[in-house]
Image (cartoon, helix red, strand yellow):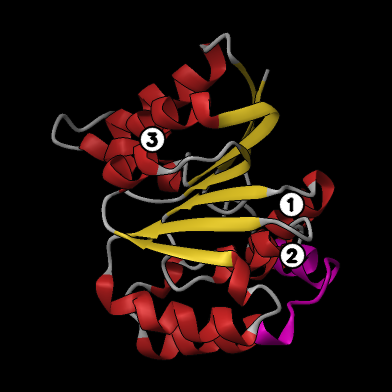
């Protein structure tokens, strides 16, 4: 969901950095061949992720939720020369699709794919991270956050996607809607947890920037 009008959203996109050609191809093939292409970060949010990564110049990045790898490649643009990205996804059928585009990029040898549950994989990762992007199953956002915070370097950044959840965070809660209930709790935790400081941006479906103190 976009919280800006289509006209203003188009203006913002036109006046942001152009989408790299490889990502144009990835965007197009995702829409042609993959279910739920709206899950793609897309041009504008992708440029935001790229800019944040370039500002941080991280050595190690963790991504929870790869989908087709668009955001992965955006985040990779800011990697330090000796940097790595660990990216986790449960969808086995997307693994080769992701790899095809990773290997066409300048960062193919730096991107490490992990297939399975983030709750199982994250505790096995033996790195300290400078930048994390959480964009997976909303029911586990709090669990991911609690696993990840101790693995962050001081001053590290955690980005959380879809935190406005198509505006459902403002609607009366359906008792059966677990995703919205968890996101409401998650947004509250990010605001109140003394280990971090947070700003929530109304970019696309909501993007939170959280800095670990």
Helix, strand or loop at mark 3: helix
Residue 53: mark in rendering: 1
Q: CA distance from mark 2 to mark 1?
A: 7 Å
Rendered view: 32 above or below 52: below
Helix, strand or loop at mark 2: loop
Q: Which residues are magenta?
A: 9-22
Residue 174 appears in which quarter of the rendering? Answer: top left
The residue at the point 27 percent across, 50 percent down is 117
Q: Nearer the viewer, residue 178 or 156?
A: 156
Residue behind mark 2? 77
Residue 87: mark in rendering: none
Give the percent coordinates (x, y) of residue 190.
52, 22
Give the percent coordinates (x, y) of residue 133.
54, 47
Relative to residue 98, is residue 93 drawn left or right?
left
Q: Residues within 10 Å of mark 2 (few under 14, many from 20)?
A: some
Q: CA distance from mark 3 to mark 2?
A: 24 Å
Q: Nearer the viewer, residue 184 or 139?
A: 139
Helix, strand or loop at mark 1: helix
Q: Nearer the viewer, residue 115 or 165?
A: 115
Rendered view: 19 above or below 29: above
Asked if the residue at tag 1 contacts the one at tag 2, i.e. Cβ–Cβ closer than 8 Å, the answer is yes
Residue 29, magenta (yes or no): no
Give the percent coordinates (x, y) of residue 145.
44, 30
Residue 144: mark in rendering: 3
């Amino acid at each position: 969901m976009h919280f800006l009008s289509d006209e203003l959203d188009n203006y913002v996109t036109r006046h942001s950095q152009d989408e790299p050609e490889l990502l144009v191809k990835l965007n197009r093939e995702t829409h042609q061949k993959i279910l739920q292409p709206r899950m793609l970060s897309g041009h504008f949010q992708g440029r935001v992720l790229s800019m944040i990564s370039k500002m941080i110049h991280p050595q190690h990045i963790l991504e929870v939720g790869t989908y087709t790898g668009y955001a992965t490649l955006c985040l990779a643009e800011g990697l330090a020369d000796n940097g790595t990205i660990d990216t986790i996804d449960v969808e086995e059928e997307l693994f080769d699709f992701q790899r095809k585009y990773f290997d066409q990029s300048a960062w193919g040898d730096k991107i490490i794919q992990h297939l399975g549950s983030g709750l199982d994989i994250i505790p096995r990762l033996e790195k300290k991270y400078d930048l994390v992007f959480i964009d997976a199953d909303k029911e586990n956002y709090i669990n991911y956050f609690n696993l990840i915070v101790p693995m962050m370097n001081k001053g590290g950044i955690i980005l959380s996607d879809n935190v406005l959840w198509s505006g459902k965070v403002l609607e009366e809660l359906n008792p059966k809607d677990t995703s919205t209930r968890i996101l409401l709790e998650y947004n509250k935790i990010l605001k109140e947890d003394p280990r971090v400081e947070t700003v929530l941006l109304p970019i696309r479906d909501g993007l939170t920037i959280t800095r670990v103190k």
